[in-house]
Image: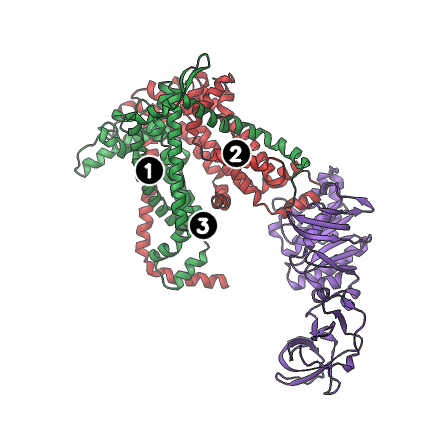
Chain colours: A purple, B red, C green
Amino acid sequence: MNGLSVAYGEKTAVADLTATIASGELVALLGPSGCGKSTTLLAVAGLLNSSAGSVRFDGRIMNEIPTEQRDVGMVFQQYSLYPHMTVYDNIAFPLTMKKWPKSDIRRRVDELAELLRIGELLARRPDRLSGGQQQRAAIARALAKRPKLLLMDEPFSHLDSSLRLELREEFRFLQQRFGITTLFVTHDQEEALSLSDRIMVMADGRMLQYDTPEQVYHRPSSRRAAEIAGHPPMNFLEAEGQPWTLGARAEDWLMADGDTALVRGRIAVIEKTGKDTLLKVRAPSALLRVYASAEWPVAVGQEIGLQIRPGRAHWFDSRTGSRLEAGPELSELRWTGA
Amino acid sequence: MRGTNENMWIKGFSKPTGRWAGLLLDIFVCALGAAMLFPFLWMAAISLRPGDQTMSPQLLSSFPLEWSNYRTVWETLPLLRYFENSLLVMATSVLFGTIVTICAAFAFTHFSFYGRKILLAALLGTLMIPEQLLLIPNYMTVAGLGWTDRYAALAVPWMTNAFAVFYLVQVFSAVPREYRFAARADGAKPSAFLWKVVVPLCKPSILTLALLKSIANWNAYLWPLIVTNSKEMRTLPVGLLAFSTEAGTSYELLMAMSVILVVPMVFLYFIVQKHLVQAVPSAENLKNES
Amino acid sequence: MNDKKSWRGTHQAWPYLMPAMMIVAVFGLYPVIQAFDLSLHVRYDYYRNLVFERGWDNFSFVFQDPEFRLALRNTLLLIVSVVPASMVASLAIAYFLHTRRLLSRWLQPAFFLPLVASVLAAALAWRWLFHTEYGLANATFAGLGLPAVGWLTSPEWAMPSLVLFSVWHSLGYNVLLFLVGLQAIPPQYDRAARIDGASRWPRFRRITLPMLRRVLYYVSIVSVVHAFMTFDEVFALFGGERAGPMDRALTVVYYVFRKFYSESEYGIASAAAYAGFLLVFALTLVQLKMSDRRGG
């Protein structure tokens, strides 16, 4: 993609997006709803016209090539399978369009059905499949013609959580084994972080960061990007008159004594989520979300002193929101409110 | 589990309505249904009476039933010819009309093209116009084309209209766009997408439209009466019309002919009835739009 | 969609559009213009396709013609009688069919049969029921001790007979539309009202009826237009020769048909058709305004 823009009438949905996806990579488009990630996906597929810029596959400009000839496979959140066809006919559909001989189609469909473990379901109609089975079949269909690029729009979003994890892992395995270049859209930061080779973080039609999950998580390029990737959302402390905003993720806090504490506050809520305990700490003009270690003695209403783990503080320009490489010495700061 | 509980609730509450009142209402509406059917029952009954008993006010006045009336009608009228004409005109008109309408509706929902707005406006303009207003000029057009007394005059003019196009535009635009995206990614050309995906998906609504067209076409009498002169070109309704002036008071024969005219449509209705119910939500959409 | 208009799209679209658009243009759009032109022809010779004079004379003739005025009066009478009667009856039937699912499976076809059957055939049966001497209508009257009535032969009974037949004939379609509307109402509302202890009639009045407003409105417009178009019923019921005894069931469209078909007065027929069309249009606009005011 090179300087890709997509416009709906007067409104620009995606502006000036430039990125390269390496062959065999799995790239996640991450962002809040309405940020233009689906639009980007559709533009890459050729289903939307780009108003500026170009889309290249292997260096070849695709702008004028209609979707039918772009050699992409697509999977959607729902309505992926044609309801009036059996699973077999669905998977065979792209091959029928290519006028493959019947025997070849059969071989390919059987092979895919085995890979995605839907062999017994081939004769069924989509309405008699579970959500997970439907998405398996949809992936099988998208892969049937061995596309250059697989595009997926929230493919796992409306599945139950356990099924979602299972299918995700399986898909990752398949994708790596066959080296399927994939671009997929998700609003789920955990999915993006755990699954992909690279993440494209988007907001308001712009690309904020395009990097590996580690970099996106540990070195967010801007305050906005830091908000999008990571849950619970990063805590921010803004001091009036200072050129910087301080950010720290919930898991990057230590308990600290009076003198060394950066922030002091009162525990407002304790949420136990199995292995973790999340505290909501009311500090002067800020509500911090902090993961507590098992040894912390915590009780609602208790006063607590907190400090950021060494090297885990993020500094952002308080005006532009962009990342600053360094900030003041943490031990010298005391938070007293904005 | 939850569902059954809910049903029990509702049942409990509907009790006060009263079982007897409900039954009475049931009987009343059944009677009303019978009353609706009554003219048809009467028609069938008279068609099975001997000629001298048609005047009896009793529904079942004579046994044995007089099936020979049908044979008499068959022998006096070129019924086979009428049937052929009706069937041929209906089949071609409905088949081609539906295809042509599907294509047009698909173009409106699938492509962005120059002139789309103008065409839609022109179609909308013809939506309100009564068919009877068109009768005169259309007769002149058909006469000018030299189609008088030809099948083309019977089949072509009413093949499609603005209502049919709008109805299917509405139905097609309810198809989720994901299907279109997926089909294009799968390498389907527009025509393949239309016939392999859209049409099978919208089958109930298309069948509904086809049924309505069939009924209108089969029962049409005014237009065929106007554009045909020769007996050979008569359709069944025109045949009945001619027969009712020719047969005079032979009511049993007229009724037999009427039964022959009505029965095929009743069959058709029962065949597609199941799909009509499925097509209902899209008809609702149409109404909200118009 | 951001799919911009393009020559590519245009090239693809037109082959699909062409056949239908040709038919609509030739047999739907052109005749409208043609009819208007015809209505202005005052002196002409159709055999040689010559028009000597154009003007508004046909319109002034139509409005001064007592036959047309009778036709107009009858048509309005049909609208104010058939539309409410058919709507109330069909709504009641549809509501019943809706609440009694099991029974309705068997009863629905009975109400739809008049919709499916040829109006000519149906009218033949009705003519029989309406027969003065042997018809069932008069037999029932006799049973109740009432005098026999010339349903189709006496001038004063022509319109009531026509109304009766028209209501019967239009019932099925309206029932179908109301059923559609009723099925579109989410059942939760009715359930909630039941839990609140509302009985059948208040539930119908306060919940079902307001939620049916759009359908009611649609049915009323369609019914008015349809009643205005009444032709088949007259033609079939009175045997196609005259519009009932002494023309007493003459309607606007029947007038148009007669001028055109029997008298070959193409100009007058077109003028009458246009005058009628404009009246329906005005009536529909009034309905639109009224429903707008009620927030339809």
Q: Which mark is first along the chain, 3 or 1?
A: 1
Q: Which residue is tagged 3?
A: C183
Q: Based on the displayed image, in which of its 4 quarters is residue A100 positioned?
A: top right
The spot of residue C114 in percent (x, y) is: 38, 36
What label does residue A303 carry, if any?
Answer: none
Amino acid type of disc 3? Answer: Gln
User: Can residue C195 be spotted in the picture?
Assistant: yes
> In the rendered view, would you say A308 is above or below C64?
below
Nearest-to-viewer mark from 1 and 3: 1
Tag 3–tag 2 contact (CB < 8 Å): no
> Which chain hosts label 1?
C
- The outermost residue toward the top is C48
> In the rendered view, would you say B85 is above or below B16?
above
The spot of residue C284 in percent (x, y) is: 40, 39
Tag 1–tag 2 contact (CB < 8 Å): no
Q: Gap in Å between the C-alphas at discs 3 and 2?
A: 33 Å
Secondary structure category for the residue under label 3: helix
What label does residue B122 carry, if any?
Answer: 2
Nearest-to-viewer mark from 1 and 2: 2
The spot of residue B166 in percent (x, y) is: 52, 38
Q: Which residue is tagged 1?
A: C79
| Disc 3 packing (10 Å; few <14; some 14–19; many ≥20) | some
